[in-house]
Image (cartoon, helix red, strand yellow):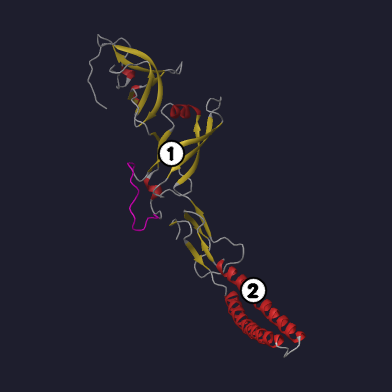
Amino acid sequence: MKSQRVEEGEVLATMTNTDILAQTASAEADIEAARAQFINAEQTVNRYQYLVEHNAISRQEYDSAVAQRDAARAQMESRMAKRDLMLSEQSKMTITAPRGANIIQVYRESGRYVRAGEPIFMLSDLHNLTGRSVVPHVLFQQLLSVGDRFIMEIQPHRLTNKAYPFGETSLPKTTLKLNQFYMSIVSVVPDPDADTDFHEVTWHVENPTGILEPTYYDSVRIMSKNTIRKLAVPDKAVHKDAKTGNDYVYTLSDESRLVRREITCGIEGDGLTEIVSGLSEGEPVVVADPSVYTEGMKVGAKEYEF
């Protein structure tokens, strides 16, 4: 079954070759006939040995009996070797898993004819996956600033109608949601410090539930695994100067007058913008439309919590 988890040595399929079965049965019959001839020849040699010792027959007759016995043994062993070769071919009719893995693809359903060399299954270990993504340089630098292990969140609807390879077993214990997965950076091209617009990032994705399948996922959300305290303000409090391109906010002076403050922004998300520099914790920012205000204007402030 597609996406089913199998362990090393577990039988995946058993094939039947009627020709080999018939040839093996015929070989077994030939072995029994050769064994009977050998036993008869062995008994003749034993009887002739007594007779030749008492000069009842010639040495030549005894030697001839020994030669016939040896020929019978050789024929029996030859037929047994032929039978063993057929049994070896039969053993190849049973396909077992080379290691613990998930069945990614089934190329031949039960009852279908299989030719030599044709694939039947594709196996892969879904517990640990490798992913690749193209990340803008600025965003990648922001990711590096919060650690090297992250949580990837897939849109829930992308994980519906999946084959869950658990049977009656329970899901692995995890603090994450079913659509969240731990991931870490494996490699980056070009180098993180290179002067480039984008990086191709290779990730190691932990998939203990086996829910993820090798495919393309879009609109993936990457979050820091670490809990890091950062200063942030609502997005609507941040403005960009049309001439200089610098970001700024309006804050309040001790006399409740508007003061324009240039800032350096960091990561954006969930309606908030990280403030790298330019503001201190506890300073108020104005979230109202700045077009109706001018710097230095005295205003009344109403405090909101976010």
Q: Which of the 4 quarters of the picture holds residue 6?
A: bottom left
Asked if 107 appears above or below 24 in the picture, the reply is above
Is 167 magenta? The answer is yes
Frontmost residue, 6 versus 209: 6
The stretch in magenta equals 164-176
The residue under the point 57% across, 67% down is: 114
Q: Tag 1: residue type?
A: Met
- Image spot of residue 111 (x, y percent): 51, 70
The residue under the point 64% across, 72% down is: 81
Dot 2 lies on which element? helix
Q: Which mark is residue 298?
A: none
Frontmost residue, 278 versus 147: 147
Q: Nearer the viewer, mark 1 or mark 2?
A: 2
Compute the Cα span from label 1 to label 2: 54 Å
- Image spot of residue 123 (x, y percent): 51, 55
- Image spot of residue 139 (x, y percent): 46, 29
- Image spot of residue 256 (x, y percent): 25, 11
Left or right for 275, reference 91: left
Residue position for label 2: 82
Is 274 magenta? The answer is no
Give the quarter of the figure containing the C terminus.
Answer: top left
Residue position for label 1: 183
Give the quarter of the figure containing the N terminus.
Answer: bottom left
The residue under the point 48% across, 56% down is: 8
The residue under the point 38% across, 51% down is: 160
Q: Specify few, some or many for label 1: CA neighbours under 10 Å numbering under 14, 14-19, or 20 or more.
A: many
Q: Residue furthest front?
A: 54
Dot 1 lies on which element? strand
Q: Residue furthest bottom?
A: 56
Prevailing secondary structure class for the magenta stretch in the rendered image: loop
Q: Which of the 4 quarters of the picture holds residue 69?
A: bottom right
Frontmost residue, 225 versus 300: 225
